Amino acid sequence: MENKRSEWSSNFGFIIASAGSAIGLGNIWKFPYMAGNNGGGAFVFVYLTLVMVVGFALILSEVALGRYTKQSALGAYSKINKHFKFIGYLNVLAAFFVLCTYNVLGSFIIGYVMEYLTSATFITTFTPEVFYDELVSSQSVILWQISFIFLTSIIVINGISGGIEKVSKICMPLLIVMFITIMVKCLSLPGSEKGVEFFLKPDFSKINLNLILDALGQVFFSLSLGMGVNITFGSYLNKESNIFKNSFLIPFIDTIVALIAGLTILPAVFAFGLNPEKGSSLIFVTLPTVFENMAFGNIFGFLFFLLIFFATITSSVAIFEVCTSSFMDKFNISRKLSVFIIALISLVVTLPAILSFSTLGHIEIFSYTIFEFFEILPTKYLLPLGGLLLCLVVGHTWGIRNVSIEVFGKRNLCFEIILGSLIKLIIPIGLIIVFVKQFV
Ligand code: PHE
């Protein structure tokens, strides 16, 4: 296979790129609306608990598996046992669907950024609803889609330290600074404290199985679990890096950003008396309505969509990398060719998903539109399945003791007992309940 595998320029490079992958639409678009739909604080409480237990154990296992095998998702599983090759394929398939949904949402976000940038009258000419409806069904959205895929491809072509790592090092700090600025502004709005209370004060009576399942799905999506991202990124990690520490830091940073997003969006929505239970249109329709009514709203709107754009592109690059490196490992082709092939396929497959907002809106797959199907298939099925299979492989074939040796360079009994009970028992049982629940 490969002799010279690329590496991160430093451990910090790995952390920032992994944070770039983890911090995405999951944090900014999904987390606040899922919290909004699931009673606020109760959801946040369950989510935080699951990140600490499930998130940490699975990230650690994926990164260790990647570094040990020095292979992307496809090669990593088959290196453990050649019968496990299909798990790698499932991972890449999940990543591909997520990539297509990112292409769609990325193109909408470029549409918003351009609108805020070029027209001072955004909000006065259209209501946000009308703008959204017109954008998603316009021809220009296809142009934005091509631009988004092109930009992602250019970054991935530049490789690990020269592309992904560099872009994350620029985008992530900017994202955090812009986000904190907007959060402070939103928290200073009169009436915002109701949103803070809604978001942070758990009403434990709201916790039920559905809420737990939603939170678990969100942990998988937000930490990019079950689709080979952390395996691939781990495979570029050198032996000196501390996997244990990294596996704390990445979920920690990701969760901070999700909390900032919740503390920005929900207080603003409450301050203007809008409904937080607006589902996926929370950032595309509800939030622009907030900016419309705010002093300097156009500037804040522009900054907000720019930061979402940064979050989206760094995640999309990570998912693209999973597909690219799997193709490179599998077919022994150059990075350039692999990027070209993935860009082309994803362009073609994304097109019907974009058109499902307009001309292809009548087509249904299991009663979902094409876009909804692309979004739901990985989040609800493929990622938890990837997580379950990861637990089986790590717990029963590769073995917890080998994880310990990869992570610490030696056996560590206490670590093995804790990780073993999570990976062999607690997490698989949770994931099996998820599956049973999806089908009954
Ligand atoms: N974790 C990203 C988010 O929260 C989504 C993602 C999934 C990114 C898989 C990369 C790979 O939005």
Image: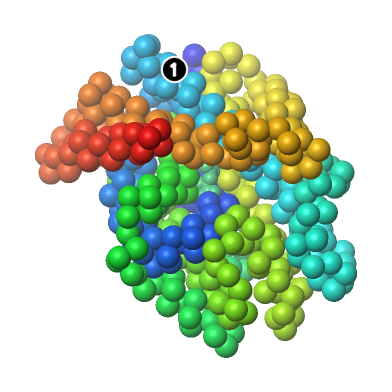
Q: Amino acid at mark 1?
A: Phe
Please, which colouring scheme is shown? rainbow
Q: Residue furthest left?
A: 413
Along the horizontal axis of the image, is 240 left or right of 404?
right
Residue for point 63% across, 16% down: 333
Q: How many marks?
A: 1
Along the horizontal axis of the image, is 137 left or right of 439?
right
Instruction: Name the residue carrying label 1.
Output: 86
Say which quarter of the image contains residue 81. top left
Image quadrant holding the C terminus, namely top left
Along the horizontal axis of the image, is 69 left or right of 325?
left
Q: Residue furthest bottom?
A: 190
Q: Is residue 248 visible?
A: no
Residue 417 in the image: above or below residue 40: above
Say which quarter of the image contains residue 432. top left
Comparing 158 with 252, the one in front is 252
Q: Secondary structure at mark 1?
A: helix
Residue 117 in the image: above or below residue 30: below
Comparing 42 with 166, the one in front is 42
Residue for point 49% across, 57% down: 34
- Expressed as whole percent of the image width and height from the top left, the position of residue 137 reads 81, 47
Residue 115 in the image: above or below residue 242: below
- Expressed as whole percent of the image width and height from the top left, the position of residue 274 reads 61, 73
